[in-house]
Image (cartoon, rainbow, N blue to C red):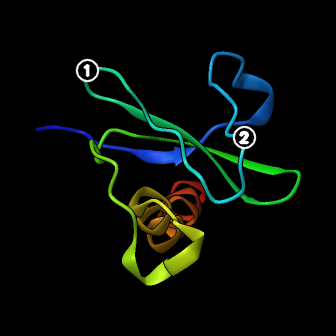
Amino acid sequence: MEITAAGTLRANKTNSIPPSRELNTPIFGYQKYITILPYVPKSRKVIHLMSSIHHDKEIDSTTRSKQKPAVITFYKQTESGVDVVDNLSIA
């Protein structure tokens, strides 16, 4: 069984990730099984994502000029799963 993950990284743990310099311009970084990227959706806000599911520079076509990577769209659609698992583990 293969386990996959997609999520965000804390800003204080991202020393080795190159900063994205321009608004709505993702910079993708790859290792063997992991994709990492910083993305700037608005001024002075950077989101750092890591995924073992996405291995290309796919851009979500529905985001038009925002050029939002597909990994961000996927993360937003599935982020509630962590909350469900947390609630089940407490019960």
| Alpha-carbon span between mark 2 and mark 1 | 25 Å
Q: Position of residue 64 (x, y in %)?
A: 50, 79
Mark whose residue sits in front, 2 or 1: 2
**Residue 24 quadrant:** bottom right
Which residue is pictured at 53% across the width and 39% down the height?
27
Give the percent coordinates (x, y) of residue 35: 39, 35
Q: Secondary structure at mark 2?
A: loop
Question: Can you name the residue that lies furthest to the left here?
Answer: 1
Give the residue displayed 64% in from the left and 16% down from the top. 16
Q: Which residue is mark 1?
A: 32
Q: Secondary structure at mark 1?
A: loop
Q: Is residue 30 left or right of residue 13?
A: left
Which residue corresponds to the image point at 27% horizontal and 27% vertical from the top-left? 33
Q: Quadrant of residue 58?
A: bottom left
| Residue 51 place in picture, x, y as percent | 40, 42
Which residue does the numbered mark 2 point to in the structure image?
21
The quarter of the picture where the N terminus appears is top left
